[in-house]
Image (spheres, rainbow, N blue to C red):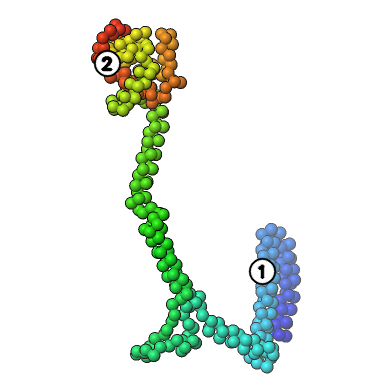
Amino acid sequence: MKRLSNLLFLLLAGVPAVAQEQASSTAQSGASGNILMNIVIVVFIISALVLLGVSLVLLNTFKVLSKELLNPTSLPAKVPERILEYNEWAALKENKPGIFTRILGLKPISEEKDIMLEHEFDGISELDNPTPAWFMWLFYATVIFAGAYLLNYHVFKWGKLQDEEYVAEVEEAKAAKEAYLAKSANLIDENTVKENKDASVLSAGQAVFTSNCVACHGDKGQGIVGPNLTDEFWLHGGKINSIFKTIKYGVPEKGMISWEKTLTPKQISEVANFILTLKGSNPPGAKEPQGEKES
């Protein structure tokens, strides 16, 4: 330790000398680069001294610890007691069954002798491990569920079987389809209306015509106040779109009222399709043609 103290004193004493020598040379040369270099040298020397001091302290600490560890009499009195407590705790932990062992309902190794059977082969004994409680409860639950299922679906028939559910779903889909078609039918306008010769559509259109159009166009479409609807001549177009538009908006200047607020788009489409079927019927007493011939 004395040698190390002397070495540290010499190094610390040499720093001012080196700094003074470097300062004198700097003053003589007057170069700024030498000043920076001197600062770096001083910092390096100081850092080396600090590291050396830390190393000496650590070395001394290691020496003290090694002496204490090699001398058992220097250990605290409670250390053996703590070692004994640790050994007891480790033994208890070793005998304590793990999570996997508890889940499967297995006995720890120390208790296997109590459940060992007489059957033995090739040095391997058979153990009488009981079925885990959770597995038995699961089995009982499946039995209860099976009984409830049988009573619900096959005895009292409270629930629907798969074929019955299928029939019910088909009926629901059919009703939903009819509701959608009924709703979409009222979304028709003069741009989307299509010619339809279905018997049900024509029958519904005839009923609308009889209720609302006979007073002006006659019961057979021969024309009274309004024009003849059975020939090839049309005042406002004879296509399905044109007829729909005429019925919907009317022709107020010629006495044709608008049916937009009286009839639904579906009804207007039906009566327009019925009017198309009157072409060429040539009823008696038909009014003379008016308008332009529809090609």
Task: Give the secondary structure at mark 2.
Answer: loop
Query: In the rendered image, is residue 195 in sight?
Result: no
Q: In which quarter of the image is the N terminus?
A: bottom right
Task: Give the secondary structure at mark 1.
Answer: helix
Q: Which of 74 and 279 is in front in this view?
A: 279
Q: Nearer the viewer, residue 77 or 176?
A: 176
**Vertical placement of residue 87 versus 138, above or below:** below
Q: Where is residue 59 in the image (x, y as percent from the top left)?
A: 65, 82
Q: Which residue is drawn at 28% across and 8% down?
A: 286
**Vertical placement of residue 42 versus 125, above or below:** above
> Residues under labels 1 and 2: Cα distance?
115 Å
How crowded pointer 2 is (Cα within 10 Å; few <14, some 14-19, many 20+) is rated as some
Q: Residue at x 38, y 53 (%)?
A: 160
Question: Outermost residue, top direction?
Answer: 288
The kind of residue on which mark 1 rests is: Phe
Q: Position of residue 198 (x, y in %)?
A: 29, 27
- Dividing the picture into quadrants, the one containing residue 288 is top left
Question: Which mark is first along the chain, 2 or 1?
Answer: 1
**Vertical placement of residue 129 versus 185, above or below:** below
Which residue is identified by label 1? 44
Q: Residue at x 53, y 81 (%)?
A: 96
How crowded pointer 1 is (Cα within 10 Å; few <14, some 14-19, many 20+) is rated as few
Query: In the rendered image, is residue 264 in sight?
Result: yes
Q: Position of residue 21 (x, y in %)?
A: 72, 69
Q: Quadrant of the C terminus?
A: top left
Picture disc at residue 279: 2
Name the side, left or right, on which 222 lies relative to 56.
left
Q: Nearer the viewer, residue 220 or 54?
A: 220
The kind of residue on which mark 2 rests is: Lys
Question: Outermost residue, bottom direction?
Answer: 73
Q: Position of residue 114 (x, y in %)?
A: 47, 88
Question: Outermost residue, front direction?
Answer: 156
